[in-house]
Image (tube, helix red, strand yellow):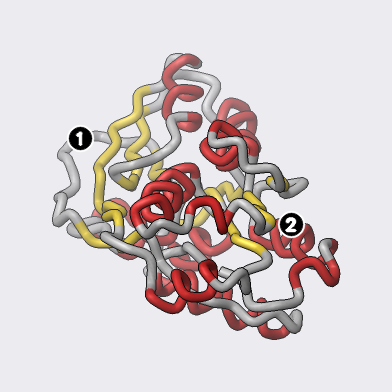
């Protein structure tokens, strides 16, 4: 399990309920940047991650604005902190047409963003004539090494499936596995990814067993894992 520590702990509980035994090795550490909200007149607030909501500082004045969220966890975090939740969609591709329908004239959005992020939402809005002010309220710092438990399990051939949730975490995993001298061993595992974009670094390294979830969410990634049956019934990472 390569997710940041808090996310990995939540996912580990779900995997144990499915009779899988997770091995945790977070390759990212999520940290606040301390960025303050930029001044300006905004029509709405956007966030694609719960971390964007949780790490927003000085955002009290924004709570009167419509809040548009990508993902249920983002929406839950916004509700909990008193934001005025409006549009919710599963991913950036799904929320864009809803935003275009709502804002048919150029609008100004404040985006509570991470430092390393996909550009789909921002690019889509800007192409349609909207303005987006992205404030980077959190960052994902790369781990310096895989956990010893993960290295030992991979080296022993005990890892059957590796779950990849972001392109960046996949890239970091490849670098850390190479540094640990276990790159060739990990090729034997199934590598299951949230989307085609997440899979690309693995495919570029010619990993032979890469799967992509039907939809880019954790439910469908776990469904893909469950479909593997006996191939992934031993400890996984």
Which label is found at residue 18? none
Which one is nearer the viewer's eye here, 81 or 1? 1
Residue plotted at (63% across, 49% down)? 194
> Which of pointers 1 and 2 indicates the residue nearer the eye?
2
Which one is nearer the viewer's eye here, 202 or 62? 202
Which label is found at residue 220? 2
Residue plotted at (26% across, 60% down)? 144
Residue 93 in view (yes/no): yes
Rendered-image quadrant of the C terminus: bottom right
Residue 91 coordinates in the image, percent (x, y): 60, 44
**Mark 2 nearby-residue class (10 Å; few <14, some 14–19, many ≥20):** some
**Residue 121 against residue 88 in the figure, above or below:** above
Q: Earlier in the sequence, mark 1 or mark 2?
A: 1
Mark 1 lies on a secondary structure that is loop
Residue plotted at (62% across, 28% down)? 101
Residue 117 coordinates in the image, percent (x, y): 39, 40
Which one is nearer the viewer's eye here, 92 or 29? 29
How many numbered markers are drawn? 2
Left or right: where 224 falls relative to 164: right
**Mark 1 nearby-residue class (10 Å; few <14, some 14–19, many ≥20):** few
Residue 47 in view (yes/no): no
Which label is found at residue 40? 1
Mark 2 lies on a secondary structure that is helix
Left or right: where 144 falls relative to 11: left
Q: Specify the quadrant of the image occupied by residue 56.
A: bottom left
Residue 152 coordinates in the image, percent (x, y): 47, 75
Are the residues flagged by discs 1 and 2 in contact, CB closer than 8 Å? no
Residue 94 coordinates in the image, percent (x, y): 65, 37
Gap in Å between the C-alphas at discs 1 and 2?
Answer: 39 Å
Residue plotted at (60% across, 40% down)? 199
């Amino acid at each position: 399990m390569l997710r940041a520590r808090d996310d990995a702990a939540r996912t580990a509980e779900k995997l144990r309920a499915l009779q899988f035994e997770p091995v945790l090795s977070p390759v990212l550490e999520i940290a606040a940047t301390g960025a303050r909200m930029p001044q300006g007149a905004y029509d709405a607030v956007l966030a694609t991650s719960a971390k964007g909501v949780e790490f927003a500082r000085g955002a009290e004045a924004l709570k009167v604005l419509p809040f548009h969220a990508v993902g249920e966890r983002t929406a839950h975090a916004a509700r909990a902190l008193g934001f005025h939740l409006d549009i919710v969609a599963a991913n950036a591709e799904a929320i864009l047409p809803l935003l275009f329908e709502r804002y048919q004239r150029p609008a100004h959005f404040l985006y509570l963003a991470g430092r390393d992020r996909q550009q789909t939402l921002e690019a889509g809005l800007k192409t349609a004539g909207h303005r987006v002010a992205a404030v980077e309220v959190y960052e994902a710092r790369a781990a310096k090494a895989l956990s010893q438990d993960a290295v030992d399990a991979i080296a022993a051939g005990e890892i059957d499936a590796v779950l990849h949730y972001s392109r960046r975490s996949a890239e970091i995993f490849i670098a850390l596995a190479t540094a640990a001298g276990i790159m060739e061993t990990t090729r034997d595992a199934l590598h299951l990814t949230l989307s085609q974009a997440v899979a690309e670094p693995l495919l570029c390294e010619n990993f032979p067993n890469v799967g992509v979830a039907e939809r880019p969410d954790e439910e469908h990634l776990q469904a893909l894992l469950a479909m593997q049956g006996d191939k992934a019934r031993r400890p996984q990472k």
